[in-house]
Amino acid sequence: MKEELTQALSRMLGKPITFVNQPDGAGLIIRTTSANASLGSEGFQLQSNATNTAITLSAQTDIGLLYGGFHLLRLMQTRQPLIQLNIHSTPKLALRLLNHWDNLNRYVERGYAGISIFNWHTLPGYIDQRYIDYARANASIGINGTVLTNVNANAWILTGDYLQKVKALADVFRPYGIKVYLTARFSAPIEMGGLSTADPLQPQVQQWWQQKVKEIYTLIPDFGGFLVKANSEGQPGPQDYKRTHADGANMLADAVAPYNGIIMWRAFVYSHETPEDRFKQAYNEFKPLDGQFRKNVMVQVKNGPIDFQPREPFSPLFGAMPQTPLMMEFQLTQEYLGQGTHLVYEAPMFKETLDADTHINGKGSTVTKSVSGIAGVANIGNDINWCSHPFAQANWYALGKLAWNPAQSSETIAEEWIRQTWSNKTTVVNTCKQIMLQSREAMVNYMTPLGLHHIMGNGHHYGPLPWGNTLPRADWNPVYYHRADSAGIGFNRTATGSNALAQYHPAAAAAWADSNTCSSEYLLWFHHVSWQHRMPTGRSLWQELCFRYNQGVAQVRTMQQQWQQLQPYIDKERYTQVQLMLGIQQREAVWWRDACLLYFQQFSQQPIPAQYEKPAHTLEYYQNLKFPYAPGNG
Ligand code: GCU
């Protein structure tokens, strides 16, 4: 910790700093104290008074000191006064993780920032400085765990050679309070162990995992545990043997329990056989299993019921499994959010879910209260600036900050990040904040306004494809989700439709149940409404759709103008990078608007109101665009 402070402070202040032992000396007093138990194993305290030039940083552990040290640096870098400090900070959530969807060949699934930073081939012999910087960056925002491998990865990471590599990384990350976790392919006992089955109730399968786990903990005594994607999108799992998700999770949980390991078992499942609304499937599968999981199993639930869309209602599983600790899974990498080139600050989206009221234990039962940890699917790659788009790092930053304290506002987090990343100048801070805070709503408007969802390109999910209807599974096709026809548009999930609404507490469902009172943001998630449906703005549904798509484009153009005003204050390289990417975002927003409006117009049979720009091309033109090499998709 002293090393971090010395390095940063001598750069910030231009002179070496002194560490002192006595409260009356001038400098920084650092102490580990067992006196203040309320700080726990990760908390810290920063204190100073009005006259004293000394600042006292205390914590119960080295990691607490490290977090406190980073906090102090942040105060300085964001130009906060250092007198009369009385900060007492502890994390609100115990598990604050990144999930890398990185493969051993360094290909990052849904990655838009280069290849994986983990160079497995040169590990364990070569320790890239990047591993250390990665740990420092994560520790500076409170992240305390990382899953190194893709949820879809094969079992190779569990071989002896690779475990040596994992150990090397774990050794680098340990001083920064970061535990490593791995994904566990459920069929590993067959693929690696030569067994004929991976049935979780078979003793030889259980023994195979126990042995493997022992091997891991011998190398990495503080190994965190496993993240598992089972019986989902073709991955093997306990249901292959007619066992339940609980049987599978518990078998692994028993193997890691003697070492205090945990299992994060993903709820992202939708069956091959059931024709049931995909929205409902995770809940149907997992809700009945509440109470059947071991204590060290966490069920990891994506923020919404479908799949990281620009806007989703919160997953009905939050609050619905009171006996099972839940992890929240957010996606930092922008698979459905403009991928590598769109500026989208995700904190408002994370907050929308965290602050949503499940009503499970009465009013004020926020989603936050139902989770014990937060994981973010990482947007990191080996690009020189880590996340490719200069603003994408804000999403990594926000994830750490919100996992530490979900009550922080998106605005505060944005401001902190801007001051540390761009400048403390008021114009820069205010303008960047405006750009960031409107970016997510802009993206929803130009991609999927009014509750539209999953109308992106097949496979790579790049660009609009509302006409998509060629994939073998109905629920992979955009037409399944928007259901546009001559009568109207939207997915009826009320009692007269799939009744997904019934999965929510009645008080939460009430807000969405009636198409006349359901907020416009979620309308087409829950209702199939006519093109003439009267919106709260007084416009018809069709007019509102045209308005929103155009508003999205206008918002991006505003973002471009705002960015231009910052040219005098930003270095040329980063200024140009953002400017060019905003150019792409603007063109793609126009593409989204025109392709979607032309397509939906076939059903609404109404003109695009005269005040709006006319599409530059025909619908056929957009339908013929192909992107076989769009990134992130294998
Ligand atoms: C999405 C994504 C996949 C990913 C899956 C998951 O469907 O497109 O690449 O594997 O989510 O979360 O497991």
Image (spheres, helix red, strand yellow):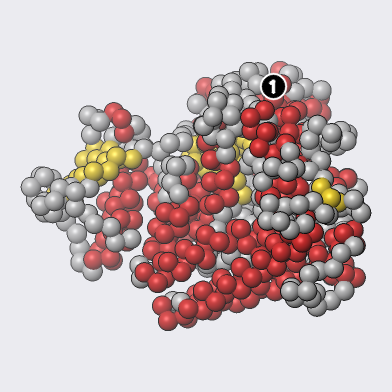
Front residue of this view, candidates 450 and 626? 450
Q: Residue furthest front?
A: 538
Asked if residue 392 is positioned above or below residue 373 in the image, the reply reads: below
Asked if residue 379 is positioned above or below residue 528 in the image, the reply reads: below
Left/right of residue 587 with respect to residue 242 in the rendered view: left
Q: Is residue 299 visible?
A: no
Whole-percent x, y for residue 83 in the image:
19, 52
Left/right of residue 522 with respect to residue 2 in the rendered view: right
Left/right of residue 576 with respect to residue 415 in the rendered view: right
Quadrant occupied by the C terminus: bottom right
Residue beneath the point at 46% across and 69% down: 431
Residue beneath the point at 90% across and 58% down: 603
Residue at disc 1, secondary structure: helix
Q: Amino acid at mark 1?
A: Leu
Whole-percent x, y for residue 587 in the image:
70, 74
Whole-percent x, y for residue 73 in the image:
31, 56
Residue beneath the point at 62% across and 35% down: 300
Q: Is residue 310 visible?
A: yes
Q: Quadrant of residue 152?
A: top right
Q: Quadrant of residue 407?
A: top left
Front residue of this view, candidates 212 and 391? 391
Around disc 1, counting alpha carbons within 10 Å, would you say few (fewer than 14), some (14 to 19), or many (20 or more)?
some
Residue beneath the point at 55% across and 25% down: 362
Front residue of this view, candidates 168 and 74? 74
Mark 1 CB in 8 Å range of ligand 1? no
Whole-percent x, y for residue 134 in the image:
47, 55
Residue, disc 1: 289
Tally of numbered discs? 1
